[in-house]
Image (spheres, coloured by chain):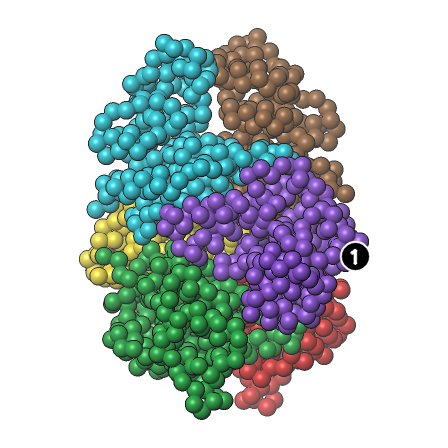
Chain colours: A cyan, B brown, C yellow, D red, E green, F purple
Amino acid sequence: MVKQRIVIKLSGSLFNFDTQASQLKEYAQLIKKIGEHFQPIVVTGGGRIARFYINLSRDMGLDEAGLDLTGIMVSHLNAKLLISGLGNICYPTTPKNLEEISLALVSEKIIITGGIYPGQSTNATSALIAERTGAVKFFNATDVEGIYDSDPRINPNARQYDTIDVKKCIDMLRNENSMAGTYDLMDLISLKVIERSRLPTVVFKSSIENIEKLVLNGIHIGTEITI
Amino acid sequence: MVKQRIVIKLSGSLFNFDTQASQLKEYAQLIKKIGEHFQPIVVTGGGRIARFYINLSRDMGLDEAGLDLTGIMVSHLNAKLLISGLGNICYPTTPKNLEEISLALVSEKIIITGGIYPGQSTNATSALIAERTGAVKFFNATDVEGIYDSDPRINPNARQYDTIDVKKCIDMLRNENSMAGTYDLMDLISLKVIERSRLPTVVFKSSIENIEKLVLNGIHIGTEITI
Amino acid sequence: MVKQRIVIKLSGSLFNFDTQASQLKEYAQLIKKIGEHFQPIVVTGGGRIARFYINLSRDMGLDEAGLDLTGIMVSHLNAKLLISGLGNICYPTTPKNLEEISLALVSEKIIITGGIYPGQSTNATSALIAERTGAVKFFNATDVEGIYDSDPRINPNARQYDTIDVKKCIDMLRNENSMAGTYDLMDLISLKVIERSRLPTVVFKSSIENIEKLVLNGIHIGTEITI
Amino acid sequence: MVKQRIVIKLSGSLFNFDTQASQLKEYAQLIKKIGEHFQPIVVTGGGRIARFYINLSRDMGLDEAGLDLTGIMVSHLNAKLLISGLGNICYPTTPKNLEEISLALVSEKIIITGGIYPGQSTNATSALIAERTGAVKFFNATDVEGIYDSDPRINPNARQYDTIDVKKCIDMLRNENSMAGTYDLMDLISLKVIERSRLPTVVFKSSIENIEKLVLNGIHIGTEITI
Amino acid sequence: MVKQRIVIKLSGSLFNFDTQASQLKEYAQLIKKIGEHFQPIVVTGGGRIARFYINLSRDMGLDEAGLDLTGIMVSHLNAKLLISGLGNICYPTTPKNLEEISLALVSEKIIITGGIYPGQSTNATSALIAERTGAVKFFNATDVEGIYDSDPRINPNARQYDTIDVKKCIDMLRNENSMAGTYDLMDLISLKVIERSRLPTVVFKSSIENIEKLVLNGIHIGTEITI
Amino acid sequence: MVKQRIVIKLSGSLFNFDTQASQLKEYAQLIKKIGEHFQPIVVTGGGRIARFYINLSRDMGLDEAGLDLTGIMVSHLNAKLLISGLGNICYPTTPKNLEEISLALVSEKIIITGGIYPGQSTNATSALIAERTGAVKFFNATDVEGIYDSDPRINPNARQYDTIDVKKCIDMLRNENSMAGTYDLMDLISLKVIERSRLPTVVFKSSIENIEKLVLNGIHIGTEITI
């Protein structure tokens, strides 16, 4: 029987100049465990090394779309780090577009990839991948705890939502007043994709424990975006 | 000497079940004339035939990202119609992503393509192409006359802007009150790309005369988005 | 155990400007049922939308080989409609040449594709695919009931063959007297491929009922080409 | 100014287990000279080495379409031999399909390739290439002197045509009576392509002298197929 | 359960102008039997036909790196001969680089390929493939019986090693005094790859019997390179 | 007239976590100037960021051939940094193998790429590229001043060669006594390629001044390898 698919976006902050293999191995182990229950498609961000190459390239004169492509290339280097820790249960390459992802699915293996399209955040890309692969849920592991009613870095009384309707979320992002600090976390395209495909989504702080709780144990964490 | 590059987005409404070769030939002729002064990169929309395949595919059960890919495929069929009318002065195939567009540029020929990335309108794609090719201007030939301060289909007193700042434009789109009727015309991603790359852009009603006036004669038409 | 392979050519007449998803879904359901017994490779024709693009492209000045490529592209859009109705039991993309078909076979999934080579009808292409995939039978679902001893549209007494030897069939096509009306149906290259590979072939009128009878129930319909 | 294009099919008999570089260099030199006046697209046959691999592969159990692909692969090895003798004035790789040929044309260099599509002779492929590249003439350098009214190996009085109408030629091939000995030379698909595109074609015996006379000096040799 | 992988390099001497299908079929049968116990990745050499094309190409003026590519192309023709004799249990194409080999592994089928990288012998390529596929052993079927302490063609008292340490082997090759005659057999890059990956390797004379003994029955033959 | 080609290998040490755009821009400017006289093909190394990813990947369990591919991927990110500073006079992508390099040459633009084949140093790759492109000279910009008769880090009296015969150089490398410190600089494969193609080569310390002197002014620096 074909396993249900889920998409997990891993924050690029996991990949840094001082990243240790031990940390990544824990993630690889967790993904392996998840792979016993689901066919996970994991999307890695670019993180600081991406920003290093992007900044240097911008200074060299590279255009913004070109910079997006540079960031994508680094996110694939990051994805390959996780593939290295998973062996035969993982698809051996990082798909480069939605068609390659469709083909990779046929293997029924764990799939790990990076960004695929310029002009989109990896959040938006992950949501598109969730659509294309018929994923039952999109887990967005980010650098913040969830979605707040105002910027928690400014307002000490900011309240985190347990659940939020996607329409309200889009509205908030439109008005930019309360979500400023969490902008990267859930941008407009990804929200619109979530809305059009009625894709169940959770935004939460990335950690081994949190992913395990949410994905494997079904314990509520962070903010669930409802449709 | 290398010619300056411009990007022209052609509304998909040009391509329909009753489109005549005579109409397309006029466009081809015009593009040829433009090609004497610039290296134009023309991006065609999908139009009604795209919508026909998209609707049928949706009824068949295809996911939304898959539908985007279907629309992209039809837009390339449309692009090939124009290539057929241009001969050797035109790049012979329709590039499928930004890297293929970069390679096509080397030929110094006219380039005609369709949509390239799912999750994006052809407007957004055209703006990314403008970034990547270093285009000096983005001409967005649409189905409306320009950008209005309120929806002209509802408000008979709606006023069309001659020029509008990109920030104001983004703001209007965010609030969705005044631009509802023109939503397709200039979506948020394309505006953000225009903003980040300070890309001079004109939104205007697509016609042979208008493109000729604007691109070849430098006469102001429609709405110029300023940065 | 690997299933036996069969090739089914589906007449392009199924794909038209007024095609309904309900019709295509019936075909998808049938292909699914066939997939329980065989590994079917389904080849879709281009139909009227292909002819629309071909006529328009010809008027634009496209050469004949280029027109073949246009028709092939539309046949792949048609193929994708059926893929959309089949989900995970179907190979997710339409192979573009014989090598891609060989690779797709490895998945042991249902394969749906369109034309692949210019200068050949989809009949001939289907016969080549049958060769390359080691198919045990080639089902050619067409717009006519079978092969006649004279053109049934002219001669009211034309008699349909139950079986016909491939050599006689080639002979008739050579002389063009009796098969004029059915030329598209079984062209010379496909017959020669059938002959060289001793490929059992049935030519019959495309319908859900007929395909079901022939492929699933083994009831004789149309004309069997014997070697 | 872009040069006119011509297609030259070179008989595979040029490429054999005892072929000498000196012979091939003469051909390379001739192609170079032709390249000063035209943009030649040269298509090489497979010859005996192709037949060696085809026979061995058939004995191994390879299907007929697979054998076509084997022959194509050897014809590309042959094509590369000529490329090796031409240096920078020649496109550096052998295009694998019509799209790659279109892209190669952009270079304005001499193009040398082998067969491209299974189920077709290199004659037919060459005719399709002539269509797609807008070639003004198709020179088919073969192993016989031209087209005869009966098989010259049987009938000592067989008369060679100076010119023959393509319709008559197709007719003769259909009846197979008079063209038996020259069957490989001009098969039905290539004739139909020649007919549909009104492609001026000459069939003649391959030799340095003959190609030079015909292509460079415009002296009539062999049989001209008229439309 | 996934089978262990092994890499078998088959000497190009198997592929010659007088090679019979019967010989190759024996090899195909043997590979099939091996495939019941392991996932073999077989790498074929170019042999005499490669040398024929290489010599002719060199005479035509092709550069050395280009000659390497020519040899690689012929080795793939050879690989396809074996694929032809194996049917569905074999991956249908010959992977062209390490990434394609990784993707082919997913099929869990027997993989047969030729050389992949210029500037390397097929020995070195095979060792790299062994690394990339996590092969447990590298069987190098060559034209000599094993590795000797001096050139057996010169020194009648040359002694063949049963086992030899890779470091000693590298040393001997460096000094070139004793391995001259066996240079092709185990070149420096392949030895360095064997060393860096601690890859168990056997060098032995290629024959059906020897491969069977070594791979299937675990009987010691030739020289084992130890690390 | 086509410019002569040269290959310049740029030491990976140029690309580091603290690399400044200003440094890279100087190199880009120099390459631009060189491009007025030659068609340079520049090959960038991977440097420290490559080593960072390689070390982390090794700890994750990636095999050695996979690590080579990781290093290659980073070297292409480095190459793109230089491309970003060169604009239209530079080929827009980094070729991935010798065939793509051949195709890139056609543009007559400056070409910048990274490593291409696993199991080879970028020195060896650069030498192969020099062969394939018919380069008249190979400039190997390294981290040392040239080739010494003994390791200059150990022996204060080590003497740098002005010129050295390639055979002697291979010999020294074989014996490893005198070249230990410069091992990375000129490995055996690259020397063998230099030898087989009689490729004029200079090994010298990488700096703007040195490249300028050597390439543009023809002033002798470092060690010239003679054949």
Question: Residue reaching furthest front?
Answer: F156
Quadrant of the rendered image containing residue F188: bottom right
Q: Quick check: can you spot residue C202?
A: no
Task: Estimate the x, y position of residue B119 in percent, counting from the top left.
Answer: 45, 33
Is F35 placed left or right of A18 in the picture? right
Bin the neighbour count of mark 1 within 10 Å (Cα to Cα): few under 14, some 14-19, many 20 and up: few
From the viewer's perspective, is residue C193 above or below residue F57? below
Dot 1 amino acid type: Gly
Would you name the residue on which mark 1 appears?
A: F218
The correct choice, above or below, for A9 with respect to F59 in the image is above
Secondary structure state at the residue bearing disc 1: loop
Q: Is D165 drawn above or below residue C67 in the view shown?
A: below
Q: Position of residue F201 (x, y in %)?
A: 68, 62
Which residue in the rendered view is the most extreme toward the left?
A: C217
Give the residue drawn at x 60%, y 56%: F153
Quadrant holding the C terminus of chain A: top left
For this rendering, which residue is in front, A165 or C168? A165
Looking at the picture, tell me which residue is in the foreground, A209 or D59: A209
In the image, F76 versus D158, the foreground residue is F76
Say left or right for C60 vs C144.
right
Query: Mark 1, chain letter?
Result: F
Left or right: where A20 falls relative to C56: left
Task: Tell me the quarter of the picture where residue A125 sits.
Answer: top left
Residue at 33%, 16% in the rendered image: A160
| Image-quadrant location for residue A186 | top left
Question: Residue D193 location, x and y as percent?
Answer: 56, 63
